[in-house]
Image (cartoon, rainbow, N blue to C red):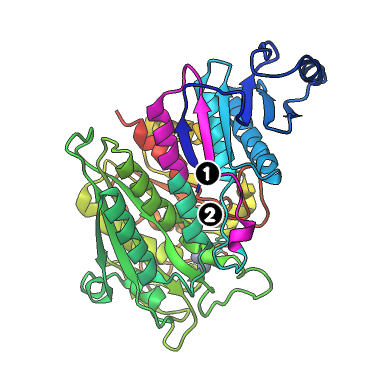
């Protein structure tokens, strides 16, 4: 864990990162004439990260890069923060002060954010975990324009993102559906939001045939977690409802995934659920004045004894029937029940997050989130601009009625697979049938889990969705 601290003063002893521009006067920060000349030369050479080793301490200078658009510039600061984090751990520093000399607090906070997100590790299963723990523990932030409140919020959002990463990184033999729900309960206690976990008996009573169908092949029971943050000063009467796919492991069920690699990362199939739980955690900790409900249906998807088989017909929570023709298209089945359940809240807007389709990942990779849905244009615009703010960009796919035709079957109300084309969209069209309120679907199969470090994201779970939803909910008017 990385702790941010607000600091009003700079001393000549501490390790510092000076954030400036080509025009900044760096002469006041303890650099010798030779060092200053070196810095100037590096700047002239268009170096952006300049390292000065004074032996008793390190000085890093970062010259911000101006990009074509503001959000791209901000992202460059995050990425630079990520790189500097690597350097800082490389030389085993425990703390460093990030000092803003530009007067733009946002970019400096983005730099600190990139550092802290990059400092995340998931090593608690290793016997030498102490030895390999990153040295960096504290990031002090200094600057005339930097506000203590903003640092506090940044701490909350970074912690929540890292929590989501850890939930995703935990394998199913340590985090089954019951354990995932228990983690949400702990987070609710800590942050102060309400958590109710429905057990299998209650899920049966609610006739959630999708969730129960997927769970048939498992020996572990399913859970359905309901989280609520309803502060007295909430700006909205009708809640925002967040729904997260909580497939704690996806083997594909009897439509078993081929073992060669395609199953290796499937502990990430609850990344949507993790994002929802950790967003609840962040908004409650930050005391955001918004009424939000989080729903996470959870189970593993396995080909055990009584597993559902292709051809089975499931009756869903809303009474509709589904001919299940591919046991690996399980996410939409559990989400459908949750979206149908969400109706009772009369949502202002519901957003589901799900590692739903390989098709979404194939279309745009780890670089963004595939979205579609029925919300008003201005809501979509607000979501897209939050996506740019946090650099979790949204790409809207077409959502034409014709795609729903691909889900038709003669013997039930729909089937759970579409045709050979537009797999991400037909999955979305399936979900749409269970919504009767403004709704957006976020397919995070591409960005949820990465198999190599990328920018300020270590390998594994990325925590995608948490920063995005926090930004969006912070801007509710
Ligand atoms: N969990 C997978 C989707 C996925 C793929 C997530 C890659 C993360 C990375 C989902 O349950 C799935 O298997 N979808 C199938 C649907 C198909 C059978 C209609 C897919 O995309 O192949
Ligand atoms: Zn699947
Ligand atoms: Zn899945």
Residue 315: horizontal and vertical position, in percent? 31, 72
Left or right placement of residue 137 versus residue 32 in this view? left
Give the quarter of the image for residue 12: top right
Q: Residues within 10 Å of mark 1 (few under 14, many from 20)?
A: some
Residue 118: horizontal and vertical position, in percent? 60, 44
Residue at 69% over, 32% down: 56
- Lower sequence index among marks 2 and 1: 1
Residue at 57% over, 50% down: 447
Residue 32: horizontal and vertical position, in percent? 75, 17
Q: Is mark 1 on a helix, strand or loop?
A: loop
Q: Mark 2 points at which residue?
A: 424
Q: Mark 1 points at which residue?
A: 397
Whether ligand 1 has any atom under 8 Å from the Cβ at mark 2 is answered as no
Residues tagged 2 and 1 counted as in contact (Cβ below 8 A): yes
Left or right placement of residue 254 versus residue 288 in this view? right
Looking at this view, is 64 or 95 the one in front?
Answer: 95
Quadrant that contains the C terminus: top left
Looking at this view, is 83 or 6 the one in front?
Answer: 6
Residue 294: horizontal and vertical position, in percent? 31, 52
Q: Is mark 2 on a helix, strand or loop?
A: helix
Residue at 63% over, 28% down: 17
Specify the segment rendered in magenta. Answer: 129-158
């Amino acid at each position: 864990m990385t702790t941010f601290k607000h600091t009003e003063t700079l001393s000549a002893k501490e390790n510092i990162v000076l954030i400036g521009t080509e025009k900044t006067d760096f002469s006041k920060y303890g650099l010798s004439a030779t060092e200053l000349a070196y810095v100037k030369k590096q700047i002239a050479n268009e170096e952006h990260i300049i390292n000065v080793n004074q032996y008793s301490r390190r000085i890093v200078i970062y010259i911000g890069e101006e990009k074509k658009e503001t959000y791209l510039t901000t992202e460059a600061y995050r990425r630079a923060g990520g790189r500097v984090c690597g350097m800082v751990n490389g030389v085993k520093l425990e703390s460093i002060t990030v000092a803003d000399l530009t007067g733009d607090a946002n970019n400096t906070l983005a730099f600190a954010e990139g550092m802290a997100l990059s400092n995340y590790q998931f090593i608690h299963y290793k016997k030498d975990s102490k030895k390999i723990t990153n040295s960096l523990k504290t990031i002090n932030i200094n600057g005339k324009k930097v506000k203590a409140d903003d640092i506090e919020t940044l701490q909350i959002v970074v912690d929540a993102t890292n929590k989501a990463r850890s939930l995703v990184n935990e394998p199913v033999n340590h985090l089954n559906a019951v354990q995932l729900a228990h983690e949400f309960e702990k987070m609710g206690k800590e942050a102060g939001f309400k958590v109710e976990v429905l057990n299998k008996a209650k899920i049966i009573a609610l006739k959630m045939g999708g969730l129960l169908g997927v769970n048939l092949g498992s020996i572990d029971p399913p859970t359905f977690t309901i989280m609520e943050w309803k502060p007295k000063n909430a700006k909205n009467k009708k809640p925002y409802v967040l729904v997260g796919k909580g497939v704690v492991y996806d083997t594909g069920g009897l439509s078993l995934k081929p073992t060669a690699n395609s199953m290796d990362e499937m502990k990430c199939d609850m990344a949507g659920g993790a994002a929802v739980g950790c967003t609840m955690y962040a908004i409650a900790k930050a005391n955001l004045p918004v009424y939000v409900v989080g729903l996470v249906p959870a189970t593993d998807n396995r080909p055990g004894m009584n597993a559902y088989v292709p051809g089975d017909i499931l009756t869903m929570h809303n009474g509709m029937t589904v001919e299940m023709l591919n046991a690996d298209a399980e996410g939409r089945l559990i989400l459908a029940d949750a979206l149908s359940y969400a109706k009772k809240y009369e949502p202002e807007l519901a957003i589901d997050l799900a590692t739903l389709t390989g098709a979404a990942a194939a279309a745009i990779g780890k670089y963004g989130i595939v979205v579609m849905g029925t919300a008003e244009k201005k809501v979509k615009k607000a979501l897209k601009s939050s996506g740019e703010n946090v650099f979790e960009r949204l790409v809207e796919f077409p959502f034409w009625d014709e795609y729903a035709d691909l889900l038709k079957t003669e013997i039930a109300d729909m089937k759970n697979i579409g045709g050979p084309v537009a797999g991400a969209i037909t999955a979305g069209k399936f979900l749409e049938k269970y919504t009767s309120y403004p709704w957006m679907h976020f397919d995070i199969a591409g960005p949820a889990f990465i198999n190599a470090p990328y920018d300020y994201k270590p390998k594994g779970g990325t925590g995608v969705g948490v920063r995005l939803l926090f930004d969006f909910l912070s801007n509710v008017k």
